[in-house]
């Protein structure tokens, strides 16, 4: 029997996209008609055959989850006008903005530590990041993951995993050590041909390129199922997947699997190397003649709340005075930062200059959502040349916020906005943010991690008033505008920095 | 037969009929991601209850009952009421589900039939069934409307079902 309406409803259900109002109709039909139920199973059978068939084929050739969309022209100007008052004409060059299209996958694991990790396609997955379900490809190095279920995995690259949920992971390739505390008992690792159900243990799995998986139980018990065998292996037992799913016993080889200790040791030594490298770079930065202000937040005078301006020939008064805010850990263990949370967490300084061109570079970490304005830096004196550098929420455009640089003259404001440049995924990560404000040439650009996000025309030349600065807060408004997060480096140059210089600073300072 | 041997036998039945049980779960849920978890939960319960399986009974029917309860449990956790079938509907569907084993012969002819799809339809089928993207995500990836993706999926299913049946019926006169 052919019933188009029924097939439509059944297919929408199988697609996972049946609207609520249609579901009631489908339920009524399924409850009342045996023929309709039979049709359900007929349609479902094809669905199941397709899923099974294509899943068995699914090796490699996965679709990347990000793509680059080319944005052009001034399509966003109308939206911006809703948010701000008195915008003068601004426009944006077409620039590729990486954009996560498939962000709907649930997050199921935390990256706890990485050591020399190199990811497929140069992805910058770091400690603290949350991982969604899907494919994870590590080309080299060691990584420790902790699933929300409580199970943890140490991966040694090259490795490829398909994370199905916080309890279920398919190992396609590579060496993996699983540590499963009692709370996560029942954690399952799949390999081609095997299903391993953990019973509270530490075990290693390796899947070489020829696909012949090995299981080594280092401590505890693991249930193994293949197409023909179901049995348990316990401490000190190891096996290889043989022909037709048979288990071929092997001598256990604990030393061939990476441990949590390996990741910790290598990660700690790499972090201290990065810190030493950054200190070297910071010493060179401090000799740069065009610096107006340079805080690296090291050797600060904690008792008097003073942050020394390390720029050559620093003006008296340009040392930062820490009003509120707490000392905290920066990009690496042993590197200090200031943590900003509440109103009054701010730094004040008096550089006493007016500049036609300047570059602002800050290393910051946002610790809260982007649903309120967050001030990175501003000159508080109302009048010509007053500037603000801030995060600007864009609720109409989705969860991401814009970076904004605003120059104001009592209501006649000029804006440079990098729309949707701060997606929620950046929360909790150390970022290098920069603004190159060349108002003499009438151009203002925003950068994240050395990459230019936007360049905007800023109209006529007008000098920026940097006589007085407030960092990390607005200071005198009822509207909440506090930066919530940490800052561990801030540099202001008296000139427009080259993009190559900025990229070099990023490379030397990235965590 | 001793307990361990019964359990062993039941687990092997599960492994053998896993594709069929998974198809059952996937169809009731309308969601691939949750289906994997439900299959694993079902496996654990089957293992736990192995002794209560009647050796003369139908394993698939027995496993479906366990799977249906796991589907209900997962739905209560993951899906809103408007996105899932009521328990009464799940019960009616489970009672009418065919208990034949998964037909591996259909998988054997599937690649040939997939090869006959138009390139765009093939791409959508891959994105949905292999990469498990939701139709909404596919629409975004391809710059299509979600409705057009749904229509393409429906047509592909109808075509592939007919093609598979024809292939299995043998060469046409």
Image (tube, coloured by chain):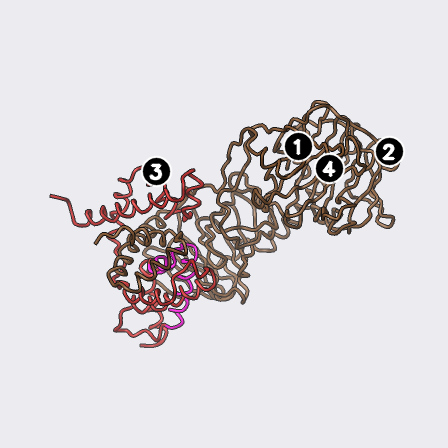
Chain colours: A brown, B red
What stretch of residues is rendered in magenta? B24-49
Determine the secondary structure under disc 3.
helix
Magenta: main secondary structure: helix
- Provide the residue designation for mark 1: A87
How many other residues sit within 10 Å of disc 3, few (<14), some (14-19) or many (≥20)?
A: few
The tag earlier along the polypeptide, 4 or 1, is 1
The relative height of residue A225 versus residue A47 in the rendered view (above or below) is: below
Callout 2: SS: loop
Dot 2 and dot 4 within a common chain: yes
Task: Give me the C-alpha separation between circle 3 and circle 2.
Answer: 65 Å
Q: Nearer the viewer, residue A169 or A307?
A: A307
Q: Secondary structure at mark 1?
A: loop
Would you name the residue on which mark 2 appears?
A315
- Report which residue position mark 3 lands on: B120
Residue contact at pointers 2 and 1, CB within 8 angstroms: no
- The tag earlier along the polypeptide, 2 or 4, is 2
Q: Nearer the viewer, mark 3 or mark 2?
A: 3
> Relative to residue A214, is residue B112 drawn left or right?
left
CB under 8 Å between discs 1 and 3: no
Q: Please determine if labels 4 and 3 lie on a single subunit.
A: no
> Within the image, what quadrant is residue A318 found in?
top right
Q: CA distance from mark 2 to mark 1?
A: 35 Å
Q: Residue at label 4?
A: A388
Residue A242, quarter of the rendered image: bottom left
Give the residue drawn at x 58%, y 27%: A93
Q: CA distance from mark 4 to mark 1?
A: 15 Å
């Amino acid at each position: 029997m052919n019933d188009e309406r029924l097939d439509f409803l059944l297919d929408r259900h199988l697609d996972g996209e049946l609207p609520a109002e249609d579901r009631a109709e489908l339920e009524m039909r399924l409850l009342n008609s045996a023929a309709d139920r039979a049709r359900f199973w007929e349609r479902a059978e094809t669905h199941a055959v397709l899923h099974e068939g294509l899943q068995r084929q699914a090796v490699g050739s996965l679709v990347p989850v990000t793509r680059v969309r080319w944005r052009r022209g001034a399509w966003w100007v109308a939206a911006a006008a809703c948010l701000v008052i008195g915008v003068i004409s601004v426009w944006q060059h077409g620039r590729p903005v990486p954009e996560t299209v498939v962000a709907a996958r649930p997050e199921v694991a935390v990256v706890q530590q990485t050591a020399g990790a190199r990811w497929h396609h140069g992805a910058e997955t770091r400690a603290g990041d949350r991982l969604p379900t899907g494919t994870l490809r590590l080309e080299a190095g060691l990584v420790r993951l902790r699933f929300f279920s409580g199970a943890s995995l140490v991966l040694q690259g090259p490795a490829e995993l398909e994370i199905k949920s916080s309890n279920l992971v398919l190992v396609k390739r590579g060496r993996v050590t699983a540590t499963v505390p009692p709370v996560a008992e029942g954690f399952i690792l799949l390999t081609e041909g095997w299903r391993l159900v953990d019973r509270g243990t530490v075990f290693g799995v390796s899947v070489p390129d020829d696909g012949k998986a090995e299981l080594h139980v280092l401590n505890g018990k693991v249930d193994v199922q293949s197409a023909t065998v179901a049995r348990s292996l316990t401490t000190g037992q190891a096996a290889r997947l043989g022909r037709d799913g048979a288990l071929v016993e092997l001598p256990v080889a604990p030393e061939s699997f990476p441990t949590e200790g390996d990741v910790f040791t290598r990660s700690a030594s790499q972090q201290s190397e990065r810190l030493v490298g950054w200190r070297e770079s910071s010493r060179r930065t401090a000799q740069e003649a065009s610096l107006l202000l340079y805080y690296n937040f090291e050797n600060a005078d904690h008792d008097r709340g003073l942050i020394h301006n390390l720029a050559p020939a620093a003006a008296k008064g340009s040392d930062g005075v820490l009003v509120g805010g707490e000392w905290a850990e920066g990009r690496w263990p042993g590197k200090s930062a200031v943590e900003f949370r509440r109103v009054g967490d701010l730094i004040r300084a008096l550089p006493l200059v007016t500049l036609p061109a300047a570059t602002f570079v800050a290393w910051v970490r946002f610790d809260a959502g982007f649903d309120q304005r967050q001030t990175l830096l501003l000159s508080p004196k109302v009048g010509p040349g007053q500037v603000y550098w801030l995060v600007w929420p864009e609720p109409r455009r989705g969860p991401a916020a814009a970076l904004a640089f605003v120059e104001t003259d009592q209501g006649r404001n000029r804006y440079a906005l990098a729309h949707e440049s701060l997606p929620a995924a950046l929360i909790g990560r150390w970022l290098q943010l920069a603004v190159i404000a060349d108002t003499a040439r009438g151009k203002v650009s925003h950068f994240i991690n050395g990459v230019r996000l936007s360049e905007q025309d800023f109209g006529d030349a007008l000098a920026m008033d940097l006589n007085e600065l407030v960092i990390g807060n607005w200071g005198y408004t009822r509207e909440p505008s506090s930066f919530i997060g940490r800052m561990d480096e801030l540099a202001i140059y008296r000139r427009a920095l080259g993009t190559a210089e900025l990229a070099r600073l990023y490379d030397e300072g990235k965590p | 037969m001793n307990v361990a041997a019964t359990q062993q036998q039941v687990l092997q039945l599960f492994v053998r009929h896993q594709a069929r049980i998974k198809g059952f779960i996937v169809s009731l849920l309308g969601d691939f991601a949750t289906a994997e978890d439900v299959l694993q939960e079902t496996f654990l319960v089957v293992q736990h209850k192995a002794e209560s399986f009647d050796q003369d009974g139908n394993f698939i029917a027995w496993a479906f009952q366990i799977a249906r309860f796991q589907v209900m449990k997962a739905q209560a956790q993951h899906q809103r009421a408007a996105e899932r079938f009521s328990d009464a509907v799940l019960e009616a569907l489970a009672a009418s589900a065919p208990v034949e084993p998964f037909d591996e012969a259909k998988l054997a002819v599937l690649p040939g039939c997939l090869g006959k799809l138009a390139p765009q339809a093939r791409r959508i089928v891959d994105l949905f069934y292999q990469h498990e993207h939701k139709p909404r995500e596919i629409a975004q990836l391809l710059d299509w409307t979600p409705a057009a993706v749904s229509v393409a999926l429906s047509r592909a299913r109808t075509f592939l079902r007919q093609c598979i049946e024809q292939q299995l019926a043998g060469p046409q006169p």
